[in-house]
Image (cartoon, grey):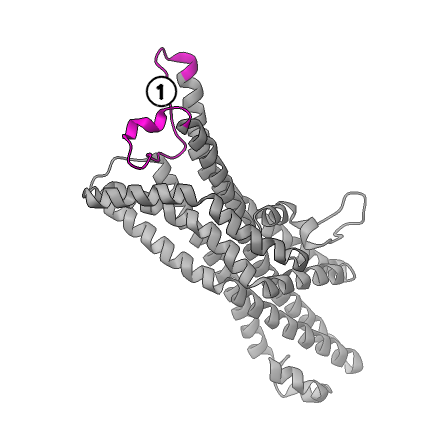
Amino acid sequence: MTIPGKKQWEFTSFPETFLITSFSMSIGMIYPNPATDKWRLLAIPFALLTVSPVSVFISVEMLTLWKNGEILEFMRHFAMFLPFFAGFVKMSLMYYRRVEAKKIIDIINHDYAYYNNLPDDYKAIVAASIKSSHIYINIWAASVMVIFAVFVGTASVLNIVSHLFMQEPKRYMIYDINMPGRDPEERFNSPYFEIMYFYTMYVALMYVLSFTGYDGLMIVSVNHACLRQNIFTKQVQEAMGMKGERLRRKMADAVKDQVDALRLIDYVQTTFNIYMGYMYVLVLVEMVICIYLTNEDYNFDFQFTCLSLGTILHIYVPCMIADKLKSTVWLLNLFISSSSSAYCSPLLDIGLSNCSPLRANI
């Protein structure tokens, strides 16, 4: 974005422009940096190992609930466990697709440096795109933080109020997890309560980092693909006001940029398509569980409700920005087909026959 003290619309690199997203990606072990590949390959299994105790405890309790026929409680635990597991799916997928993800960031860095040399009307388009990305990222990050605050904040406030103002203080866990093979009330005894309190806080922080970093990159990537389409449209519009050699060069540059834009879209699809399929199944399961619990008159659970709404929003945000890309490409195709300005026979008339390999790639 704009750097204080510099001229208007001075664009920097991806890490500087989207600082919070880059920080979350780095701490959450999903930033595609070749220098840290070996470290991440060790860190991801270690992170999974650190949360394995809570996973085992929840799994044991779910098995007990299933055997006892307590389906409603079983469904509640299951709905909580799926989004948590999604964080490690992101880590694994980002490592698996680290080459494509790195290319996306490299393209964004290259484009921002290139856009600094464009006229102000182009820079205005770029600045609007970056602003849009920040808006979407902030909305999603706020949603994740609300879910974090609902679990951690609610338990913390209730514990403080209980110990300050009640004669017989009660203890509240961030997420109720019983000790396997023990009486449920023993979960409030020391030191189990204190250990699980800070342990589940660590798990919640892992959730925040993975969901803000990965999804932030997805938002920026799709928005940047839309930006490339808008820049191409602007280039073609300007070319139509030129003649001769200037027209030929302008159109050749536009077509080359469009080929790069299509490669970017391919990288975005390759990087995020598996996770989007996983999220589709996850949200479908969450919605089915919500409907089931509602029909069974399950007691209102504020934490479960917020997590379910956040999960549904999780699929809505990427679908919304993906639809934005689809709409941008559709309008671009409509513009091209109605103007005979880009890929039709008039290309030969303005001396672009040498660009036929580019046309074939497109």
Q: Is residue 98 magenta?
A: no
Where is residue 8 drawn, in percent x and y? Answer: 77, 50
List x then y, in percent, for residue 62: 29, 44
Judged left or right of residue 163, residue 321 is right
Extent of the magenta region: 163-191
| Residues packed near mark 1 inside 10 Å, few (<14), some (14 to 19) or many (20 plus) | few
Which residue shows up at 64% across the image and 75% down it? 259
The quadrant in which the C terminus is found is bottom right
> Which image quadrant is residue 329 in?
bottom right
- Identified by mark 1, the residue type is Lys
Instruction: Using the rendered view, name the quadrant where residue 106 is placed.
Output: bottom right
Please give the count of numbered marks on the rendered protein.
Answer: 1
Closest to the observer: 206 or 260? 206
Can residue 241 be spotted in the picture?
yes
- The residue wearing badge 1 is 170
Residue 253 screen position, x and y as percent: 72, 75
> What predominant SS class does the magenta segment belong to?
loop
* Residue 325 vertical placement versus 336 (above, below): above
